[in-house]
Image: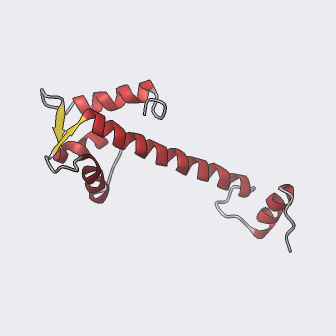
Amino acid sequence: MADIISGEKVNMFMDAFNSLADRNGAISTRELGNVMKTLGENPTQEEVQDMINEVDKDGTGIVKFPSFLSVMASKMDSLVAEDEIREAFRVFDCDGNGYISRTELRHVMMNLGEKMT
């Protein structure tokens, strides 16, 4: 997990988590959305529920930091993948209008050595 998230991000997540944690270093699952908001996220109720289902498999209603960090690592991983997809799209979208025209697709495919018919 440490190789997925930088130390700086781990500290940021820890600070946000600890701002709402009790003296045992845990938060209730009800606080999970608030921690996300502290981090600048605006998760939907559905997204928060998905996170709760992932971190509270035993149904205790309590989240410890390692579980929270694990969820954040997978969230960061999917954000990186999304960024990579957006970057790949930009390669095809030569004029930057948000669409890939036939001409742009043909140009890229020919540069990759693919023949278009």
Q: Which residue of the protein is positioned furthest toward the front in this rendering?
A: 58
Percent coordinates x, y for residue 64 in the rendering = 22, 36
Figure coloring: secondary structure
Q: With 102 as the anchor, is 30 left or right in this view?
A: left
Quarter placement of the N terminus = top left
The residue nearer to you, when weighing 117 against 96, is 117
Q: Quadrant of residue 107?
A: bottom right
Residue 79 coordinates in the image, percent (x, y): 48, 47
Up-down relation of residue 89 to residue 99 (above or below): above
The answer to whether residue 29 is visible is: yes
Quadrant occupied by the C terminus: bottom right
Residue at the spot 35% in from the left edge and 39% down from the top edge: 70
Q: Residue furthest bottom?
A: 117
**Residue 31 image offset from top left, x and y in percent:** 19, 43
49 on left or right of 92 = left
Q: Position of residue 44 (x, y in %)?
A: 31, 56
Q: Residue at x 29, y 50 (%)?
A: 54
> What residue sits 23% from the left and 50% below the top?
57
Residue 49 figure quarter: bottom left
Depth order, front residue of 20/52: 52
Marks counted in the figure total 0
Residue 93, relative to residue 61: is it above or below? below
Residue at the spot x=38%, y=29% of the render?
10
